[in-house]
Amino acid sequence: MSSKETPELKRLKGLIKGERKLEPEDLALFGVGAAVATLAPSPTDVIYFYVERWLDDHRNQISPTRYWGLKAANYYFTDSAWHFLLLAWILASKKPVDEKAEIYFSLVGAGAVVAVLFDFIHEETKKRRASPLTGLQRGSIPDLEVAL
């Protein structure tokens, strides 16, 4: 093994090659990581919600098989892709573990901010489309649209 390998990469290679056994510490760390990854928002949440909205808007234009296949792929692969890329970056990075954790949680925080901003933008767009006088959506009554 090269001296430039990170401790995490050495452990992972040892597991793959059978040089070491899976220890309870490994499982505990995996469990904690999986729990945090499931609960914490990620930057891919924006992509997930956008694809979901697109699928809902085009539901009747695509076949049921393709619709549900795309929904399942979106659900399972969008968030997973983010975490696999993040794991690869952490393993390939030559930084100390505590610095990696700091960077990881900064990225998770940034993902949370992006997700919240996306939600705020969506709600603001809905409010601006609503007519202030009637509460109806613009375009629902043709004569009202001319008056506005």
Image (cartoon, grey):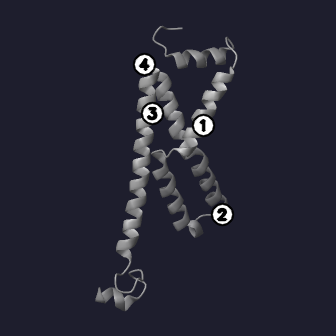
Q: Residue at x 37, y 67 (%)?
A: 124
Amino acid type, label 3? Tyr
Counting from the top left corner in percent of width and height, residue 74 is at 57, 51
Task: List the single residue furthest toward the bottom.
Answer: 143
Work out whether residue 82 or residue 57 is closer to the camera in this orientation and state it. Answer: 82
Q: Earlier in the sequence, mark 1 or mark 2?
A: 1
**Closer to the N terminus: mark 3 or mark 4?**
4
- Residue under label 1: 34
Q: Which mark is residue 94?
A: 4
Which element is circle 2 on? helix
Name which residue lies at 64% across and 28% down. 28
The mark found on residue 64 in the picture is 2
Give the mark count.
4
- What residue sits 64% from the left and 23% below the top? 26
User: How many angstroms separate mark 2 from mark 4 (CA)?
Assistant: 47 Å
Q: Earlier in the sequence, mark 3 or mark 1?
A: 1
Residue 122, position as x, y percentages in the image: 41, 63
Is residue 50 something that shows in the picture?
A: yes
Q: Quadrant of residue 117?
A: bottom left
